[in-house]
Amino acid sequence: MTEIRIQQADFEPGAEIAALEDSGGAAGAIATFIGMVRGDGGLISMTLDHYAGMCESEIAAHAMEARKRWPILALRIVHRTGKLAPGDRIVFVGVASAHRQAAFQAAEFLMDYLKTRAPFWKLEQRAGEETWVSARNEDDASIRRWQ
């Protein structure tokens, strides 16, 4: 099972994990990542936008790539859009597999992709200014290790 959702509404991590547990008893591990908006540097809010349809297709292609690389039983990705404040949940990545190493690696692979290549636009608002977020060098280095 693969589920990918792009939504404005918040998500409940416990419900997302419970959905991953429903793999017929074959799962030996579930690895998750929950990303939150940081309030450092005086950040007031972050607004995320995406190209509906294209974004989901791109994420689905990378989910399929993860399934080719690791024995994944279930996979869930939830990414929020809209205006978010520091402390708000922004992304959930969850992977169920028979073994922990595959679950950890697949989750990390998917998170590295979402951070660097997924077609989201992020606008940060600070007192008196707005700036578009661009990829950082360390994020680009993280994605290169999967190539």
Image (cartoon, grey):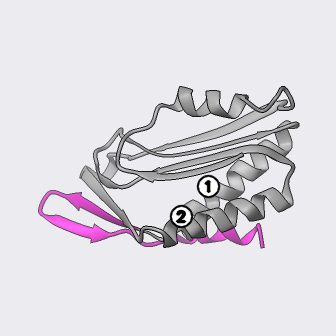
Query: In screen coordinates, is 1 left or right of 45?
Result: right
Q: Amino acid at mark 1?
A: Met
Q: Which quarter of the rendered picture does the C terminus lie within?
A: bottom right
Q: Residue at x 12, y 63 (%)?
A: 128
CA–CA distance in space, label 2 to label 1: 15 Å
List x then y, in percent, for residue 85: 28, 45
Q: Which residue is mark 1?
A: 111
Looking at the image, is mark 2 or mark 1 earlier in the sequence?
2
Q: Which residue shows up at 78% across the image and 33% down it?
A: 23
Mark 1 residue crowding within 10 angstroms, few (<14) / some (14–19) / many (20+):
many
Is residue 132 within the magenta segment?
Answer: yes
**31 displayed left or right of 130:** right
Task: Give neighbour class at mark 2: few <14, some 14-19, many 20+ (Cα, 10 Å).
Answer: some
Pointer 2: what residue?
A: 56
Q: Is residue 138 visible?
A: no
Residue 82 shows in the view: yes
Quadrant location of residue 47? bottom left
**Where the N terminus falls, by quadrant?**
top right
Nearest the viewer among 108 and 92 is 92
Residue shown at 62% from the left, 55% from the top: 111
**Picture quarter containing residue 10?**
top left
**Boundaries of the magenta span:** 121-147
User: Is 37 situated left or right of 99 in this image?
Assistant: left
Q: Is residue 40 above or below residue 32?
A: below
Q: Position of residue 32 (x, y in %)?
A: 64, 39
Instruction: Assign a secondary structure to mark 2.
Output: helix
Seen in the image, is 124 located left or right of residue 105? left
The front one of 143 and 29 is 29
